[in-house]
Amino acid sequence: MKAVASLNSGSSSIKFALFAIEAEQRLHLVAAGKIEKIGIAPTLRARSSDGAILLERDWPNGASLHHQDLLADLFAWADAHPLEQREIVAIGHRIVHGGRTHAAPRIVDAALLDDLEALCPLAPLHQPHNLAAIRAIRDLRPTLTQVACFDTAFHHEMHPLAARLALPRALHDQGIRRYGFHGLSYEYIARRLTEIDPDLAKGRVIAAHLGNGASLCAMKAGCSIDTSMGFTALDGLMMGTRCGTLDPGVVLHLQTQMGMSAAEVEDLLYNRSGLLGVSGLSSDMRTLSISQAPEAEEAMTLYAWRAAREAGALVSALGGLDGIVFTAGIGENDASMRARICKRLEWLGVTIDEEANSKSGPRINGANSSVKVYVIPTDEEVMIARHSLDLVADQVQ
Ligand code: ADP
């Protein structure tokens, strides 16, 4: 039986999934898991599709273990436990930045790797780790087809004005422009919406991917026309540890008046801001939502304020609004945050059905709402697997 794998390699975690390829190339989840706390005390958990634990490992003294060491361990385990003799025909990777040229998934070769390497400064928190996983697997399985799936690709055709920063033209031509991210998630949501509510899928929708990283995407007929993230994944919404939209004058001030180095500013904006920075407590919404500290409440209020403000901007880009879709960790699970954001969008005619919202819908708008509101769990892994299979389809007849 043949299978396709997907891998999402971040700075401190690697998510993976294995899908069996069934009749008519349908994908069926076999196993999924996560390596976490890389660089501290790594843990590895893999479960079968029915939730049974397949593999559990902890490395309490494994601070020096790198992504490649842990992937080697995972592959060694997979060899020893050939999941019902499945032959992996391709492994797809989530690659945060595809730059100006990569508008669709591609099979990885040396030239592509070089190209993507050059984009690392544009996504310093993610891209190096995405590429490290590709290299590690190339060393472990030199003949395995690897596929790069870009988070920027879904936004490639967004409105030209949405892609342009108000900077001199020459900089735009050099690639200093808005790209947008979370594209694999938005592509999945756009496809699911055609199944769940085909009429709405043809309309004007804001999808809200609210995870540790967070962004909004304005979709018209399932295509991205604008999004809240820009040149990097720092822009737009307030996030777990990232600041979101920021007056560039702050960056200048931190460097010229406060003597911070570029590396210190980068660390501040990527790792010490957002929910963590404002609350002074945690980047994790679950932790904040049970905290009694006024700073936690202020961080959550600001989160909703900023989300609604960005949504307002995207309503303008869309010329109106037919629907909102919440997704990712916070969007899928935090009914209270969904309600807070929707409350701030009441002026658009958005109302929420509290009971439906508390059960995570999927449809959660009130009967009198002029905007449909849904909760749809995202699945970037299956999107990556789907794209990867499409590129090797001729080998899987
Ligand atoms: P990542 O971007 O790392 O994939 P996730 O999509 O898993 O992140 O989202 C992580 C966020 O989701 C965290 O802030 C976490 O607190 C929040 N979250 C997850 N489950 C819940 C829940 N049941 N209630 C509130 N927040 C939740």
Image (spheres, rainbow, N blue to C red):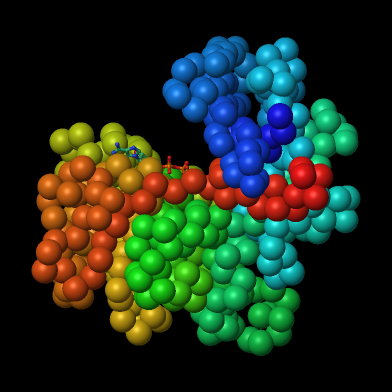
170 to 338, vertically: above or below: below
Residue appearing at x 69%, y 44% in the figure? 92
Q: Can the viewer see residue 70? A: yes
The quarter of the picture where the N terminus appears is top right
How many labels sit on residues? 0
Percent from the top left, x then y, of residue 295? 22, 45
- In the image, taking residue 347 as reference, residue 373 lies left or right, namely right
Q: Nearer the viewer, residue 286 or 347?
A: 347
- In the image, taking residue 25 as reference, residue 12 lies left or right, namely left
Percent from the top left, x then y, of residue 47? 51, 22
Residue appearing at x 56%, y 27% in the figure? 31
- In the image, taking residue 74 as reference, residue 203 lies left or right, namely left
- In the image, taking residue 335 as reference, residue 79 lies left or right, namely right
225 to 136, vertically: above or below: below
Residue appearing at x 65%, y 45% in the figure? 25
The quarter of the picture where the C terminus appears is top right
240 to 313, vertically: above or below: above
Q: Nearer the viewer, residue 299 or 356?
A: 356
Name the quarter showing ligand 1: top left
Percent from the top left, x then y, of residue 306? 31, 63
Q: Nearer the viewer, residue 394 or 65?
A: 394
Residue appearing at x 68%, y 67% in the figure? 103
Q: Can the viewer see residue 12? A: no
State the residue lying farthest toward the bottom: 169
Percent from the top left, x then y, of residue 109? 86, 50
